Amino acid sequence: MTSPSSDDKPRCFQDVILRLQNHWAKSGCAILQPYDMEVGAGTFHPATTLRSLGPRPWAAAYVQPSRRPTDGRYGENPNRLQHYYQYQVIIKPSPSDLQELYLDSLRAIGLDPLAHDVRFVEDDWESPTLGAWGLGWEVWCDGMEVSQFTYFQQVAGYDAHPVSGELTYGLERLAMYVLGVEHVMDMPFNDPDSPIPLTYGDIFREAEREYSRWNFDIADTETLFQHFKDAETECERIVSAAETDGAGRAILMAQPAYDQAIKASHLFNLLDARGVISVTERADYIRRVRALTKKCADLFMQTPLGKAAE
Amino acid sequence: MADLLIELFSEEIPARMQPKAREDLKKLMTDGLVEAGLTYASAGAFSTPRRLALSVEGLDAASKPVREERKGPRTDAPEKALEGFLRSTGLTKDQLEVRDEKKGQVYFAVIERPGRPAADIVAEVLEKTIRNFPWPKSMRWGTGALRWVRPLHSILCILTDEGGAQVVALDVDGIKSGDTTRGHRFMAPDAFAVTSFDDYAAKLRRAKVMLDAGERADAIAQEAANLAFARGWEIVEDKGLLTEVAGLVEWPVPLMGAIEERFLALPPEVLQTSMKEHQKFFSAKNPKSGRIEGYVTVANIEAADDGQMILAGNQRVLAARLSDGLFFWENDLRQAKSGMTDWAEGLKSVTFHNKLGSQADRVARIAALAREIAPLVGADPDQAGRAAELAKLDLRSDMVGEFPELQGVMGRYYALAAGEPDAVADAARDHYSPLGPSDDVPSAPVSVAVALADKIDTLTGFWAIDEKPTGSKDPFALRRAALGIIRLVLSNDIRLNIREVVAQHCTQLFDSDQLARDIANAHDVGDSIAEELKEAETILKTLDGGALQSLVIRLVEEKANELQIWNENIAHKEHTIALADDAKMALPPDLLAFLHDRLKVYLRDQGIRHDIIDAVLAQPGNDDLVLVVNRATALNDMLKTEDGQNLTQGLKRASNILTQAEEKDGVEYSFGADPKFAETDEERALFTALDTAEPAIKAATANEDFPAAMSAIAALRAPIDAFFEAVQVNTDNQIMRRNRLNLLSRIRAAGREIADFTRIEG
């Protein structure tokens, strides 16, 4: 693979991703792979939620496929998808040149801040299910929101110390802008001059149709409710397991427990898309997911990763 | 003398926080400097998205030395007293002086504080200011504990005098002060040093930063107007947006674009709101068509292509936003044309307040009240009732869901689409008015009827559930509602017995027969829902998975929800019935007293003293606000004259003498003064004057001609003055005394036709 030079423009979706990967790799981040579970946003990846806790330095970047069942539009809406990609960067402690690093990433994908109007517009971030909040901006490029830029202040109820800097790019929207595409399904995914050129639609249109139908009409709510309860129960079981195993090893299982919290969170999103959760119940489900996340975070803080390196 | 320049350079400061941050920086710094003994000639604060700056001119080079002497305890006082004195002065015993005084030897502390150089004081005050800055929200970053609105990168702090500039040394959690700053983030990112405020502002300008937010706002307004003018358009003025946008850019570059033809069908308010809220665009109006046809966006950069790419990007985002808007609008219009029945149905499930029922309940009350008020304001009752029924429906529309600030405005469009007459549609828009104290007051009769009904229902309702404003807490904006009633009544000259209207509305709120019927009804509906619910649950047990099951689950939940709403409804109505009868009786006068309080505040702002209003409110007819104000205005005018002042004194004197005599004698002097017992000419003259004045005052007040009533009573000033000059009221001759007291009572009665003069101060 030849590394794309920054003075030419990306030609396809994957080129945008590869350039971001290269940029953040050069900037010192560990390039992780997506987490292998269904999540609503890149923030849910344990590389962000759990690793932003505690004193240990951390720097990671990754693509995270994200699912928002309520945003499904059967592949017809030019901008809305129930499955899309986020690019996520998380660095702890937040470096003092994080804004510059970020702007360089825009240059890397062909957005020259001298030709475009790049602005940092106040936007505070809060995740009720994660019990997290931070201050920062949404970054506007020519009036369009292209990223979310946040300094975490609290995660799962813990004061962030040191503070993590988090960047989230909505990849489809950003790439559509860079590539000048009006409908997401028309966006070239690989190089349009490839022997087999593929558009975003070639890859995802049918999936969007199928998942939209399943999310809205078919997903069995009874099963989903049951799965939610199961995940909740399993999470609590893991959290309250004895500290030592049969062989006398002290192992706390924060990460397996957190998997169950992620599951519960996604199941809640699915139930929400099915329209079977009333307004008051909604608040209760959010509270339950947050309680799980909090327990996982409490446990994580007691694992070696939650403490200063020796 | 020296000049001080401070710049706190950070990542982007939210625009909405900048104006107050400038004030805070100036106040905290100058207060701190003054407190530490430095005076200054002038100070000015500035902000851009990335910096807060302060310039202080004519600052003392050093604080003056201070010598302070403090007297302590006597040398033979107990040890404890001396210890306390040492602690409070911070000295040791051998630093004290002993002086001989009359009562013996006394300790004296002589504390000398040498003058301090300005730099030391500035460093101290600035560090304290940074650490205690009152940002509405602040944050930490990296590994630090320092808090600022966003990460703070550098501190520029220099003192400049004839000798040149000197950096004020300062280190706040590792951020060391210096004399350098940076220009525009993209166009001039390099650091440069500055030597004074003028140098700073000039170099910033060369580095593409306009320091003064006011100048940026002016530049934006000017250039936007020029761009619009070139197309034959004009910019829709929006001061709030202008201030905000000026806080988003360091180097404003306005760019103008046109709205695509397909979006011009949207109401101008929608275009304007969407562009402002989502994109911070200014709207440009075509005066020929009266439509919003263009926009101005303000970039923060001078791009090589004159902003063509930036404009194209913005145009794209605008198109996506307005497509949403068009979708909402077309959906809503369909609803409107089909009679808005879904929206009316929807209002039933929107709780207005859990003790005051749903929005639909409220609409029914307002409609009934609007019908009653209609004849009093010259409106057709059916139109007023219809307008009230429509007025809240837009709350259920997609557009108002997206832009709550368009409530009312959309209501008018949808009412027109539904084929309602203009008067009804206008009322849907205007019935929220007046909101602020400077807001326009509706004058169209139907609008006035609905606006009044809306506010009276709000006040009566919250009074009924005892949610009155207290102190600074007024969560339901009841003071605003009261002021709204006052302004509606006064500016439209509406003769309304407000107490009666409220009392009548109470009977509607508290109509126990109607409530009992409603409750019985609600029980019936609730029972049938409960039955359906049971049935659904039974079916549910027979199903094992699949689409049908989830459908039934949803049905069950919907029914359960519905049942809950009905039960809450019943509980609320039972609560209302249970309200004691005397609570219902107490409500109208209590609410009237609240309106009177608000009226006092309102009139005080118009320059009428509170005691004058009190004097008028003590009169009968005080539930007619127009009457109250006319009377108070005339009285206020009279009291500005010398006659008025003296007359008041005379009336008060008469009243005092009478009250004392009445208390002493245990009788009321009210009748029977006879001129034949008059002893002096002054007494007889007063009789004659009263004979003329009394009918004139009565006639004038009956006609509500208060200026005439005032001049009639003012004519009594000279006779009253002369009377008190010449006559001793409390004479030994009991017949004459009684006659004079009865004469005084005629004066008192004449005064009371107009106001209770004893309440007037001075």
Image (cartoon, rainbow, N blue to C red):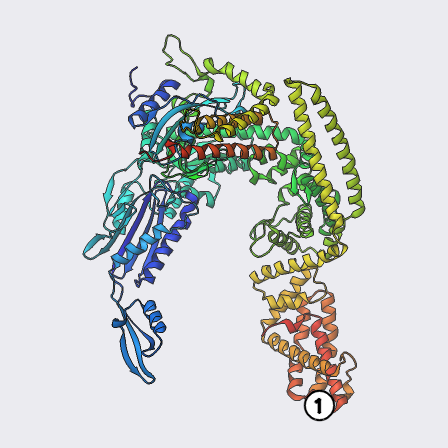
User: Between B702 and B554, which is closer to the camera in this rendering?
Assistant: B554
Q: Subunit of mark 1?
A: B
Disc 1 target residue: B731
Q: What secondary structure is found at the residue carrying circle 1?
A: loop
What quarter of the picture does the N terminus of chain B occupy? Answer: bottom left
Residue drawn at the location 35% of the way across and 20% of the way down: A18
Q: Is residue A43 visible?
A: yes
Where in the figure is residue A159, as x and y percent of width and height? 41, 40
Horizontally, residue A230 falls left or right of residue B245, namely right
Amino acid residing under circle 1: Thr
All told, the count of numbered labels is: 1
Residue drawn at the location 57% of the way across and 18% of the way down: A213
Where in the figure is residue B91, as x and y percent of width and height? 28, 68
User: Between B179 and B570, which is closer to the camera in this rendering?
Assistant: B570
Where in the figure is residue A94, as x and y percent of width and height? 34, 36
Horizontally, residue A235 falls left or right of residue B251, namely right
